[in-house]
Amino acid sequence: MSNELINAAGQNWVGANLAFWFITAVVVGSATMAAFARNIVQAAYALFFTLLGVAGYFALLGSSFLAITQVVIYVGGILVLLMFGVLLTNRPLQERTHGELGRYLIAAIAGAVLLGGVLVRVVFSTPWKMAPAPAVPVPETAAIGRMLVGNYLLPLELAGMLLLLCLLGAAYLVRRQER
Amino acid sequence: MNELVNSWGLNPAIPVGLNAYLLVAAILFVLGLIACMARRNAIGILIGVELIINAAIINFMAFWRFGGSQTDGSGALVGPLFGVFLILLAACEAAVALAILLSLYFNFGTIEVDSIHQMER
């Protein structure tokens, strides 16, 4: 593969590559904190930076639409929901932070690292089939909208039905129970 | 093509390649798995699940970007589309999971998964 095909637009990738490594540092660091932080509130705050970094990956991979969706729904919705959950199930701080990571931490780390080793081995030993990707990402929001009301109409309707069911189910689960 | 797969961003003429994204996704997946297995607080487990879902979306997007679907006629833009549906499923999952956790908290007074052994008080 010659560089000309990748680099058809004569684009310079220095900025994008630097951004990738900066985002990687943020994501890996904050995800480590989200997994290992003693305090669950700290873990939720660390998850905030992880999700923002993943949105940066989406922008680098050429989908600004998915990056914005990630920020709006994940950071603005799911993370706020998690924080509500943390604060609503609140307990005294000493009690909450004591022994948070449990007895199985060593076993969990060993098992997960073994599985991760297998994953990395597979990634590096597989000859991925590549196709020339356009150097400059295409603007895609309008095209995604057309796909959603075209070929992908059934998944869209199912997704709407699923959202409705989740809304009703969540409201049903947290109703005030008479005992 | 191997230059693009194995590019780590050192050559300014080539963007960071597929393997770098897959490696980051693997790291996120492993960290999420550790959080799922080791956390005692149920919300910590939920945080681990979010990390795993994010790793999956990164994989979808990386394979879409480098697999050439972008230029394909029928499969165009299928990466962001799957990403949107995955984010939607994650939102549903988080809402229902938190509702269950609140219900648990009302009934048991705790959401430590080690202290909840049985289905009734």
Image (cartoon, helix red, strand yellow):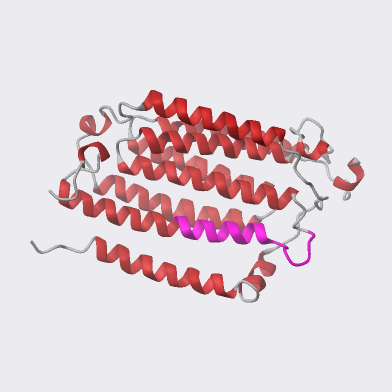
The quadrant of the picture occupied by the N terminus of chain A is top right
Residue B21 coordinates in the image, percent (x, y): 66, 40
The quadrant of the picture occupied by the C terminus of chain A is bottom left
Residue A85 coordinates in the image, percent (x, y): 30, 49
Q: Verify whether residue A9 appears in magenta.
A: no
The quadrant where residue B39 appears: top left
Tell me the residue at 54%/61% (across/down): B85
Tell me the residue at 78%/66% (across/down): B73
Residue A156 coordinates in the image, percent (x, y): 54, 71
Q: Who is closer to the viewer here, A173 or A78?
A: A173
Q: Verify whether residue B84 appears in magenta.
A: yes
Residue B95 coordinates in the image, percent (x, y): 36, 57
Tell me the residue at 45%/37% (across/down): B33
Q: Is A21 placed above or below B78 here?
A: above
| Magenta stretch bounds | B71-90
The quadrant where residue A151 appears: bottom right
Q: Is B95 placed above or below A99 here?
A: below
Judged from this view, the residue extending furthest toward the top is A106
Q: Is B94 placed above or below A92 here?
A: below
